[in-house]
Every structure is written in structure tokens, then in C-alpha cells.
Image: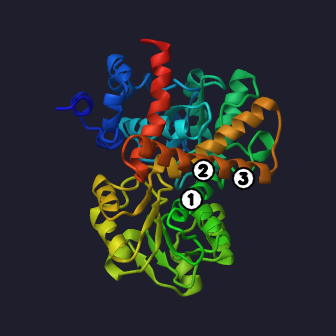
Amino acid sequence: MSLIQEVIARVEEKDPCQPEFHQAVREVLGTLEPTVAKHPEYVKAKIYDRIVVPDRAILFRVPWVDDRGEVQINRGFRVQFNNAIGPYKGGLRFHPSVNLGIIKFLGFEQIFKNSLTTLPMGGAKGGSDFDPKGKSDAEVMRFCQAFMRELYRHIGPDTDVPAGDIGVGGREIGYLYGYYKKIVNEHTSVLTGKGMEYGGSLIRPEATGYGATYFADEMIKTRGKTLAGKIAAVSGSGNVAQYTIEKLNQLGARPITVSDSDGTVVDESCIDGDKLAFVMDLKNNRHGRIKEYAEKYNVPYYPGKSVWEVIKDQGLRVDTAFPSATQNEIDGEHALALVKNGCYLVSEGANMPSTPEAIDIYREHKVLYGPAKAANAGGVATSGLEMSQNAMRLLWSREEVDERLHGIMRAIHQSCLDAATAYGMPGDYLAGANIAGFVKVANAMVAYGIV
């Protein structure tokens, strides 16, 4: 058994019942075999063993009172995984599925994603099993304040800077930051994704979707093509999906799908700017269901089906795919259907949306595959730019932030290609992203000694 396989086996033995974390460790470490022989200093310092263990994992109780006056109890988490290259950085997720294993998987991925951005940020993640859906603003506020009453003692502008994720948007960030500011009596860059009125950055809401599209644009150029005219399947209808669709339209592509947990809409005439505006109002303001899009525009709606199930069942032709909903949404059968129906590019806007079987199929069929830690790094990169603006007490223009974001995504793309070539796997974006992100962190860990 190789060193890498021994490390993976120990993780699975010592961290049972955490399948998402196991999957993330296998996916990253499985591509790091070429680094073992090339870097004996990593082996001697046991970097591979150390990098899969978080610096600390914090679990806490969150009691709050609902609108009926009843006490509710949720669990809060913050996993500070690795700060070798900068303060811990990573989002907060509020969703019933949240548990320690999911937060560890997200925090582990965040180490390498943040490393790829070229910015000095370590990896962390946090959240709660609280579900903001169906809750009043007052209930969300009381929960966020209760959550921050514990979290505040573990974060700071040079320690750990959380952001949003699933279930944590502008409303939640406002409540969290307002209470943090009240407790510590400071106005510092300790949360990103803030409103423009109190320290936010232009382009931050758009950044993950824009970044995934910029990365796809760089990948497709390696084959002498552009996104113009290409049919795009996009899953989800939240922040990432919305701005992926917006940027695809700006680059001349034809996004044709949008979905939520109830079902999928297919609009083969293209989800253009006006239709996207309807989706944004529906989801961001009215908190409605995507079925209303189908009713308004008289297009097919598939209840209970994901975008990828619809592509498989209906034989829907697509050129490119942008999974932007949640982890493991594309399995092996979905990936085979994508390839069969003409898809030759996948750029992941969500975190780990493809199962290992799906990734194997992408690689086998030479699909241009942008793994999440590279393709969706635009969100955390722009969070880093928000931190920089806060530290300098400046606000950059929309054009300047977008230009910096675009430059970062080009740099990530090139880093992936360069690392893949240097370690004997030219053109393999998955291996390139993992190796490029890992080597930077590993070198810093070696420099610090055994700490």
C-alpha cells in the first residue's frame, strides 16, 4: 500500500460516518502520488498525514426563541482546517443537512481552493443545521445573533474571516456582522459578503458564477473555441446559478436550464436577460418556486427531477455543463448521459457536485473538467479582495474588481495546467488544481517546522 493510500485508510478508520469528508480526501490525495517521490521533505515532515487533520473543530449549542415564544436548539460548527498561508477563510452554511463531516469536507476543499487564488488565505468552513427556509426575518435574526454569541470568540480579521454559503446570504451576513460589531465594539473585516453600505465589495454576489464562467472560457480556448453559441446546462437557481447564467449570456452562450429542489425548467429558446431578471425576482425577493418560470414562459417543467436527470431521461443536447446547486448532484449515469448528449465541458460552480464515478467518466472521455476548487474559486477570491479593501479603507470600482477577478481566474487556470504538466499529467485539470494548491500549502508547513 502506498503512502497516500495509507493516509486515506487512516482517515476512513479514524473519522467514520463522514462520507463526504472521505470523498474529498480521496479526491485530493488520490492525485498527489506524483508529489511523494519529488518531495521527500513532505514525507519526512508527514505533511500528508497532517494536512487531513484540522487545526481545530469547534461544535457548539445554539439556543434561540421562535416567533411562538418556543425555545429551539440547533448545532453550530466551525472547522478551522489550515492557516499555513493566511487567516482561516471559508463560508457558513445554514441547512438541515449540515453535520461535522460535511463541514470538514468543505473546509478541507477550502484549503486548496484558497491556495489557488494567489491570495494569502487559509482554509475553514462552518455553519449550522438551522434551516432559514420558512422562517421570518425576526427568527433568522434571533438565530444569527445566538450563533454569533459563540462564534465571535473564535474569529477575527487576522484569525478567521467567515463568509456566506448555502442558506447564508446578504440578510444573514447583515445580522451576523451587526451582532459581532456590537459584541466586540469594532468595525473590522471579519465577515465578507457584507452589504455595500457597511464594507462590502462590488462584484461579490456575482463572483462565484462569473468565476466559473471565466474558468470555462479559459478551458474552451485551449481547444480553439469560445463559449459563444454553446448550449449550457446550469443547475440551481440561487446566487451561483443566477450569475453563471448572466455571464454566459454576456459571453454569447445559450443557458437553457434552471432548477430548484422541487424540479427543473428547460427553456431551449435561451434564458436571456429578461427571463433571468424574472428568476432573480422570483428567488431573491419573492422566495418562490421555479415552477412559476415554466408557467410564465410556457416551457417544460419536470417536477422532482434534477437538471441532470432531465438530460438523461429526455436526451437533451448540451455543449457545456455548470453544476451550481450542491454536492454530488451529478453521478456516473448523469455524466455518461452528458457525454452521450454532446457535453464536452464541465465547470463546477457548486462544491464537489460530481461523484467520483462522474469524474472518472469526464476524464475517460477527455471532457474539459474544471473541478470546484479551481472553477468556483472566484467567490472566495473576491472575498479576499473585500478583505483587502476593508484593510485599506478603500472601495474599488466594479470594473476594477471584475478585472482582478478575471485575472485571478486566468491565473488559476494557468496554474492548473502548469502543475499538471510539471508532474506528468498534462491537461489534467483535476490533478493540476490539487497539486498546485497542495504544494504551496505544503511548502509553508515545512517552513514552519513541526507545529
Amino acid of disc 1: Glu
Q: Between disc 1 and disc 2, whose residue precedes?
A: 1
Q: Say which element carries label 2.
A: helix
- Comparing 151 with 357, the one in front is 357
Name the disc covering residue 218, or none. Answer: 1
Element at label 1:
helix
Judging by the rendered image, the residue that carries numbered circle 3 is 402
Residue 161, x across and y down, in percent: 61, 31
Horizontally, residue 290 falls left or right of residue 250, namely left
Q: Residues within 10 Å of mark 1 (few under 14, many from 20)?
A: some
Q: Is residue 160 left or right of residue 400?
A: left
Q: Is residue 10 left or right of residue 348?
A: left
Camera-side mark, 1 or 2: 1
Picture disc at residue 409: 2
* Farthest residue, direction top: 450
Residue 412 in the image, given as x and y percentages of width and height: 56, 46
Q: Nearer the viewer, residue 156 or 207?
A: 207
Q: Amino acid at mark 3?
A: Asp
In percent of width and height, residue 157 lies at 66, 26
Q: Are marks 3 and 2 in contact (CB under 8 Å)?
A: no
